Image (cartoon, helix red, strand yellow):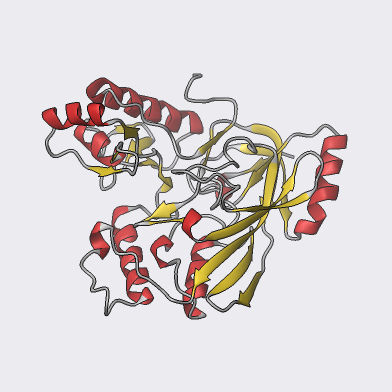
Amino acid sequence: MPVSLKSYNTFGIDHQCAELIEVTDATELPDLIRTLDAQDRGYFILGGGSNVLLTSDVNLTVLKMANKGIEVTAGNNAWHVAVAAGENWHQFVSWTLEQQMPGLENLALIPGTVGAAPIQNIGAYGLELMEVCEWVEYLSLPDCVTVRMTAIECKFGYRDSIFKQQLRGKAIITRVGFKLPKMWQPKLTYGPLAEFNTDTVTPEMIFERVIAVRSEKLPDPVKLGNAGSFFKNPIVDAVTFAAIVRQYPDAVAYAQEDGRMKLAAGWLIDKAGLKGYRQGEAGVHDKQALVLVNFGAATGADILNLARHVITEVHDRFGVMLEPEPNLVGLHSLLTE
């Protein structure tokens, strides 16, 4: 019988799959994959469901990664932490602070699982996963061989990695390794954190502030379905940015090492007059324009239609093309109705 995925995606969209299997032991994955392949049954991997938009029912088997476990090895200068893919990300961050192993506090309250974190190189408040990731372990497909890849080999970029590119659909992440230096250095570059004193700030203070800011700006998926930031911040060349600033002197952007500028997608959407915009059961959040929300009964197609509208409006006004952050799973894409 088809299984509803409503409770397995933070958008709360009620699309169905053919079968759902929770994977609590990663060592069982090879036999499971071989069986599905032998029966010619398609499948896709689901973590916390916080970075996915289901665009239709899917005639696939969903493998929900639910393996648990954390192992710590203390080195001379750092803690080396190996974490199972099914662990909840925020709970893991909180646990590291309880264990007096800071370094992840800027990434507090990001929804999803540890295994999903490297795929899009999660980042927030001045820190990206690539800065603390040591290695990623995955099951290669279709040969079902376990591979450990160093952080450099993961080809991390802005909301990007080899798992979204060359290894897309060819790897199931089972564990992630982190390196947390014992000589903790606070990262206070992001606005709400800049007011802290470097000499007196503690990891717990950063942790609590990040939670407070995220809670104020971002809707709770339990109350209002969403996948966090729906659009990537677009990176443009200096000429394009200069043209935008001439017309909009208050443009919000961040300089990149290569001379390009990363525009704040939320600012672009807001300036296009779309903050709080609603199309039926789908809408742009009224406090954070980066977030698309499900008011209760939206379908994946409804969210896609809204995303197309936002992309078109922003492009028409600024000449900048927005790209979605979540993975789109189903029969529809941004290019198909």
- Measuring from the top left, give residue 272's x and y in whole percent: 22, 30
* Left or right of 114 on screen, residue 183: left
Seen at 39% across and 39% down, the residue is 232
Above or below: residue 191 compared with residue 257: below
- Measuring from the top left, give residue 126's x and y in whole percent: 35, 57
Above or below: residue 172 compared with residue 265: below
- Measuring from the top left, give residue 141's x and y in whole percent: 76, 40
Tally of marks:
0
- Measuring from the top left, give residue 318's x and y in whole percent: 24, 25
Is residue 223 among the parts visible in the rendering?
yes
Seen at 27% across and 73% down, the residue is 198
**Front one among 290 and 15:** 290
Is residue 111 among the parts visible in the rendering?
no
Snapshot quadrant of residue 305: top left
* Left or right of 191 on screen, residue 160: right
**Front one among 67 and 261:** 261
* Left or right of 170 on screen, residue 32: right
* Viewport quadrant of the N terminus: top right
Seen at 31% across and 68% down, the residue is 209
Above or below: residue 332 compared with residue 287: above
**Front one among 68 and 153:** 153
* Left or right of 46 on screen, residue 328: left
